[in-house]
Amino acid sequence: MGGPEGAGGARRGRARRPEPRGYAVFSPQGFKEPAEAAEAEQSSQPPGRGAARGRKRPAPAAVPSGRLSRAELYEPPSSEELNRLKETEDLFHSSLLRLQIEELLKEVTLKETKKKKIDAFLHEINGLLSAIPETSESDLTDQTWLPGDVKVPFLQVPFDVKGKFRFLPPAQLSVVGSYLLGTCIKPEINVDVAVTMPREVFQDKDNLNQRYHRKRALYLAHIAHHLSKERLFGSVKFAYMNSNHLKPILLLRPQGKDEKLVTVRLYACPALGFFKPSRFHPSKNNVRTAWFMEQSSAPKEGAPEPPTPHYNNSILCDTVLLSHLHFLSTASTDFPGMKDGVALLKVWLNQRQLSKGLGCFSGFLVSMLVAYLLMKRKIVRVMSGYQVLRNVLQFLATTDLSVTGISLVKDADASLPALADFHQAFEVVFVDPSGLVNLCADMTASKYHQVQLEAKRSMEILDDRMVDGFQALLMTPKPMLRTFDHVFHLKHVSKLQSACKKMELLNELMDRGGNYVAAALPFIVSLLARGLAGRALLVAHSLPQTPEWPIDAEPPKHKDVGPLTFGLLFVPEFAASTLEKGPQADRPEAVEFRNFWGEKSELRRFQDGTICEAVVWEASTVCQKRLIPEQIVRHLLKLHADIPESSICYTGALLDSVIKSGKEESGTGEEAMVSIICSYDDLSRKLWNLEGLPLTVTAVQGVHPALRYTDVFPPIPMKPIYSFHNQIRTKRLLLPSEEKPCPAYIAPLKIICHMEGSGRWPQDKEAIKRIKTAFHLQLAELLQQQHQLICRPAVTHTDVYKDGYVFRLQVAYHREPLILKEVVTPEGMLKYQDTEESQQLELETLHRPYLTSSLHGLQQQHPVFGSSCRLAKRWVSAQLLSDSISEECVDLLVASLFLHPAPFTPPSSPQVGFLRFLSLLVTFDWNNNPLIVNLNASLTDAECTEIKNKFMAARSRLPVMFIATPKDQWSSVWTRERPSAQILQRLLVLASESLRALEEQLMDPLGSQDVKIVFRPPLDLYDVLIHLNSKQIPRHLESVDRPVKSFSRGVVKNSAGVNVLFPVVDYDPVQCYLQELRDAFSDLALFFYDKHGGEVIAVLWKPLSFQPQPFKVSNMKGRMVTTVNNKLVCVPNVEAILEDFEVLGAGLVKRVEARTEKWTI
């Protein structure tokens, strides 16, 4: 090997290969024997084999740096590489998932340089702690020795307690927890240090009445006082360990730019072997009632004291910190997969908001669970991190620890409490290796069921090849608002004090050290779960979290955890049921049912003759039925927990008001759409059965959004008032009157009528159009004759007035699009190619009807699909973008949330559907991925993969937003023309801002809860605002902030008119005006408008059109001539254009506001 370069080259060349392969390795200390090298690399390969191979083969010759020699390239793969390939094939759906997981692990694990800094910081803390001076002995209640700038981090209620305290330097300091095990992950690096208090600090009976806890707090307070003077620390603060008020800890952060690097948490713990474990069994009492209630007299002889399992557990936890560390380090030796698996599980829990707060599923708990599965041989040491993740999720999904607890005790011991004792005292049971501590003591059964449900969902996602499991499981946050169908807040947590009284929870309060939130929460949740059984899959709650506080402040009270949030996940079929059927009246359970539901329960006779207890909830419209869970929650909390309605802020349906039209008490339009569809079905039957048509009707297909339940404001049956119109008697027609306000908008409901194929159809496109017109005339005539329907035929369609709605029939012939594609080449050859006209016709007669029928089917499966769509479209329109993105595109975006909801469940309330719609817009990678909406599950895995591959190959030629459906895999017809790249960018910015603002409003129960703010568009971006006269806005009542008084619009709601003059259809002056503006000025400006009652048209100048252009006569539209550098050029004549805006809109335009501060004329 020639010189150092050769060696370096060889080394660089080998560096490309990830596995150490037993060759001699070059290092600054010279050559190492391959065996040593293998050890140094911590390779999993047995050193013997490496050494043997190393001896047989000479070191490879030098090759150009960065390249492998031919021999190496074609060398057979080692057994390790084969294992890896096999594992990738069997476990991961693709090698991409494996790479993503490896990349994520690199991202969240601590770098070596940071570890060195942290070690140095810990070293200095060690020195400082051992140098803290001792104090003289004083009573526990005499705290005058503590300086005024430090407050005891403990709620000392009641204050009087026996016992003495003196500070002595720590007997031992040890780093415990995830830092040493290598499982702590970014962004928050916490290092836990156990500070062992010397035995002399304690006296007998310190286990009673919080004496130990108060000594712990005083010990930390004295340490805090001394450390706060040191320059080493950027901040010294107190916090509660997992928000448990009995367990304060001290937080130390470094000074300067390293402050965010690490938080060192000091835990005070008792001297080993001081406490007798038998005193702390779950059935023992260590808090005396007389002391807690501050009663002077001793309790009656023989009165049993209640057990205090949570209190006992909190002391035991401190005694086993070190043994847990040893236990976990034993488990993780020779098990690199454990470190990765625990890191992945921590990310999984963080994304689901399960890993912080009182009773959380902490990272420590996960590590213990992995160790348990290792002990039970469900996991073996050769497994990778991903396999550990899968096995833990599988275990969680299939095991209910609230029913059958698990224990890490190896050998049965009669002196230890049995699992049954733990189950009696705690909701969730997972016993540690000592057999004394329940690691899940503070967890509620509801929180565990949430973890269990999440694990089940995650396993489904990992096994589904159609879903990007990595993205769904580890990269998508699941805040409560987007996860649960309804969310409500308990605004004033202090109300739980009276709940504890009402529910008689004195023993629980003693056990929890007076923390009424922790005492009442499990009971509140199980009360709600019982009341919502059958409707809700899960009743979950947020984890109470207490913020950290400065050492000179009083510790936070129990009410400082802020509002508590509850989430309900519904069973869609039963969530809106109005009846709660109970047992038969003569059964013993009937009394219990009556007690549970209170005065709401009444006797009812059912159709089968039985007389049962039942509760009937008042609700007439669909949107009121969706809120029956709210009625149940409010009723039960008032009845059983004394929580007044004013303390409950229910945010399940705050957005519904945006899609209500007309009177407040009416519903959100679902009923209106059902009646439209009934009328449409009746018309379809009449069309099929028409007599006297030369060709029969083969299919009738609706294309209007109301016929797929996604019309924002569905049409209401209308009958015109003649005095508001001018009449043309001869034609029995009405015209809008100039003196009166513009009549209410009547939308035509478009229907495609397919006629049968026949040899008599002409093959010429013009002739086909004429035949279709003849059909329109004949359909009108026959419907009038045979069914007395009022019709108005036109060239391209026939309008039919039925039940107060106007249906627009359009005849279609299946070969017409093909005939429109015919093009004759100059050589006289006939060829087929897409033309503008043929594409438009295909859209009208093929794509739109297919989409409408598919989405109509989706609505039958998911009853809130329509309302979610309508909220999404209302928002797009409110942002003035409804002309820049098609309705069908929004419908498909929302449909994808129901068809591919991972990692969530499909939405069961419109609000959650809308929040996820905004989130989809913001988080989806439109540039690199097609959005595949698998309607009717028609696409196979292979087709989806093919769509993705073709998309990547042709990306530059495809629309910026690409949506593929089974019938439209390659062309994305709904986004072909719009949105443009700029509009999409604007949409994403608005969606991101709206999502942030809306979630802020919904999560702040003490705020204004004004959710309409996201439907009020920011207008500061636009150059000109054209203000409109509200008299001439036909849909004025649909605006987001409904006008206080509106104009009578010349039509009445009435569906029973037979002999009626035909109303004015599809007449919206603003849309006509917009069309004129776009025709005249589209090269100079863009126009934006909210079609649902907007009072402003916003104008944005196109920057390019303002650059001076050479003078040409053809260039003069809207421009004027000036000279620049002695050359004649044209620039836009803005004053004249603004005047034209007013002239074109005379009577409709109130004023034109030019925002000249943004641009100059």
Image: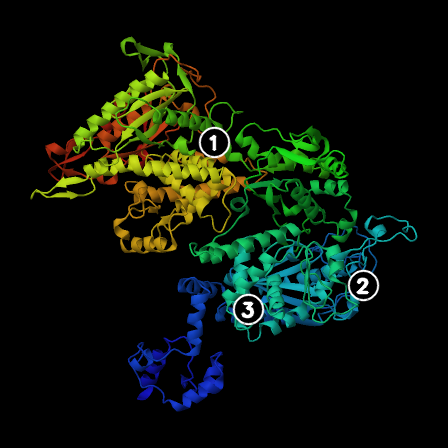
Check disc 1 and report the residue beneath it: 658
Residue 632 as seen in the image, left or right of residue 479: right
Instruction: Give how far apart the Cα atoms at labels 3 and 2 are.
Output: 35 Å
Check disc 2 and report the residue beneath it: 279
Which disc is residue 144 wearing? none
Q: Quadrant of residue 785?
A: top left
Say which amino acid is labelled 3.
Met
Check disc 3 and report the residue beneath it: 338
Say which amino acid is labelled 1.
Val
Circle 3 SS class: helix
- The residue lying at 35 percent from left, 17 percent from top is 786
- The residue lying at 35 percent from left, 78 percent from top is 12
Percent position (x, y) of residue 844? Answer: 29, 34
Residue 314 as seen in the image, left or right of residue 336: right
Q: Is residue 328 above or below residue 498?
A: below
Q: Residue furthest right?
A: 301
Q: Residues within 10 Å of mark 2 (few under 14, many from 20)?
A: few
Disc with the residue nearer the chain's start (3 vs 2) = 2
Percent position (x, y) of residue 845? Answer: 29, 35
